[in-house]
Amino acid sequence: MGNFKEDIVKTEAFIFDVDGVMTDGGIMPLVDGDFIRKYYAKDGYAIAYALRMGYKVCIITGGRGATLDHRLKMLGITDVYLDCMDKISAMQDFFARHGLDPANVIYMGDDIPDLECMKAVGIPVCPSDAASEVIEASRYVSEFAGGHGCVRDIIEQVLRARDDWARDSRGMHSSNIAASR
């Protein structure tokens, strides 16, 4: 394990939790068992852009629901483990399917269920409002809280370090996400 800025240049994939990372952790339960979550649009943009640039993005979450599944599909994420209570097995499956070296993977989590996965990757990171145990296990703590830009922060840092950020002027928007898959 070297310098953080040098190590992020080797990043092959990003793994994110949802509640508390892609959202602020707040949920509104619906009568059908689904949930309403609020997402930060700039995080979504960064995820779609990273996918377009060829990075692997995986979601491993205990969260569930049709609205969550729909949001992830809208972003173009195909490696999704919802309602997952065994995050380490899901992560190992993701590594095996894509031939990834865990040393070159970023995992962003915010709470106790993420610790095992964070300890198994080379670049564990977290939002500013993560649990203290998660902060201790992280190589980088974003200045942004969950649901307020922490995902964009880490993706942008990696892509800038690799000269992949804002490489062209077309950008990403909802009409070209599906076309880039």
Image (cartoon, rainbow, N blue to C red):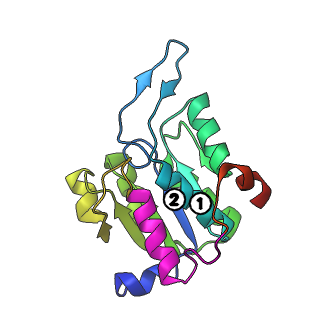
**Residue 141 position by quadrant:** bottom left
The disc labelled 2 sits on which kind of residue? Answer: Ile
Counting labels gives: 2
Residue corresponding to mark 2: 15
Q: From what the image shows, is residue 148 above or below residue 24?
A: below
- In the rendered image, which quarter contains the C terminus? bottom right
Magenta segment main secondary structure: helix
**Residue farthest along the right direction in this orientation:** 179
Mark 1 / mark 2, whichever is N-terminal: 2
Q: Which residue is drawn at 60% across and 40% down?
A: 71
In this picture, residue 3 sits left or right of residue 15: left
The disc labelled 1 sits on which kind of residue? Answer: Val
The x and y percentages for residue 59 are 55, 51
The x and y percentages for residue 124 are 38, 66
Is 101 included in the stretch rendered in magenta? no
Q: Residues within 10 Å of mark 2 (few under 14, many from 20)?
A: many
Residue 57 is tagged as: 1
Q: Residue at x 48, y 67 (%)?
A: 155
**Magenta residues, start to end:** 150-169
Q: Which residue is drawn at 58% across and 56% down?
A: 58
Contact check, label 1 and label 2, Cβ < 8 Å: yes
Residue closer to the observer: 130 or 98:
130
- In the rendered image, which quarter contains the N terminus? bottom left
Residue 149 visible in image: yes
Is 161 included in the stretch rendered in magenta? yes
Label 2: state its secondary structure. Answer: strand
The x and y percentages for residue 95 are 61, 65
